[in-house]
Image (cartoon, rainbow, N blue to C red):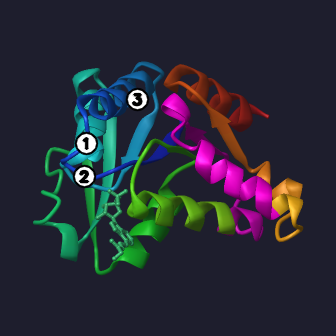
Amino acid sequence: MAAIGVFCGSSTQISKGYLDLAADTGAELARRGHLVVSGGGSVGMMGALVAGCRAAGGRTYGVIPEVLYGREIADVGSDELVVTTDMAERKNRMIAAADAFLTLPGGVGTMDELFEVWTTGHLGLHRKPIVLVSTDGFYDGLMSYVDTLVRDRFLSAEARDLLRVVHDVPAAVDVLEAALAA
Ligand SMILES: C/C(=C\CNc1ncnc2c1ncn2[C@@H]1O[C@H](COP(=O)(O)O)[C@@H](O)[C@H]1O)CO
């Protein structure tokens, strides 16, 4: 059993397909016996993720900053819910609590979380695997940008390769489990 930090969108304006993807992710992690570490809100994909996990018998650990407690409807049904004083502490608590990270589609908040975990990994502050779920090529544009950084020598290929990109949730969890076992 591992603790998997999941970064994903909080928007309530997205299409049902994204919400289903998040719910399926929560259920898949629950079925495989993993704890879901979430942003601690009940809105958008974040909410679908934790609901999907608990409906499948899994456990959730949420980390929400005070400022978002009401705005993102704190997930008070979580098995554990940590309330932080600010956004930076939220990210740090999520990173500390998780053994590995899954990034689903999301907005700038999700990108902020992904870049925090990627850059701290690259700096050697942790060795936790990071997988992006690029449903329907969602992360093609980001990875194209990262490839440009490598091509023009702003970034090493080793740093790029810390980001593992897959196209569906079961494959993403397979990759995380293999990386954790290595
Ligand atoms: C909108 C702009 C900046 C927002 N910057 C954020 N920085 C950190 N965290 C954020 C930001 N926006 C939202 N969040 C939180 O991250 C989670 C996922 O967000 P997403 O944007 O839906 O992916 C969620 O808890 C957000 O509240 C520029 O003006």
Determine whether label 2 and label 1 are within 8 Å by CB.
yes
Residue under the image location 49 percent in, 60 percent down:
111
Measured as percent of width and height from the top left, residue 167 is found at 58, 27
Which quadrant of the render holds ligand 1? bottom left
**Which dot, 1 or 3, sits closer to the camera?**
1
- Please, what is the three-letter code of the amino acid marked with disc 3? Thr
Q: Secondary structure at mark 3?
A: helix
- According to the picture, the residue beneath numbered tag 3 turns out to be 25
Q: Secondary structure at mark 2?
A: loop
Q: Is residue 79 visible?
A: no
Q: Is mark 2 within 8 Å of ligand 1?
A: yes
Measured as percent of width and height from the top left, residue 69 is found at 16, 66
Measured as percent of width and height from the top left, residue 63 is found at 32, 60
Residue under the image location 21 percent in, 75 percent down:
66
Let me know if residue 42 is in the magenta part.
no
- Please, what is the three-letter code of the amino acid marked with disc 1? Ile
Q: Secondary structure at mark 1?
A: loop
- According to the picture, the residue beneath numbered tag 1 turns out to be 14
Residue under the image location 35 percent in, 34 percent down:
22
State the image quarter where residue 154 is shown.
bottom right
Q: Which residues are magenta?
A: 120-149
Residue 34 position (above or below residue 11): above
Q: CA distance from mark 3 to mark 2?
A: 17 Å
Q: Is mark 1 within 8 Å of ligand 1?
A: no
Q: CA distance from mark 1 to mark 3?
A: 17 Å
Give residue 11's mark: 2
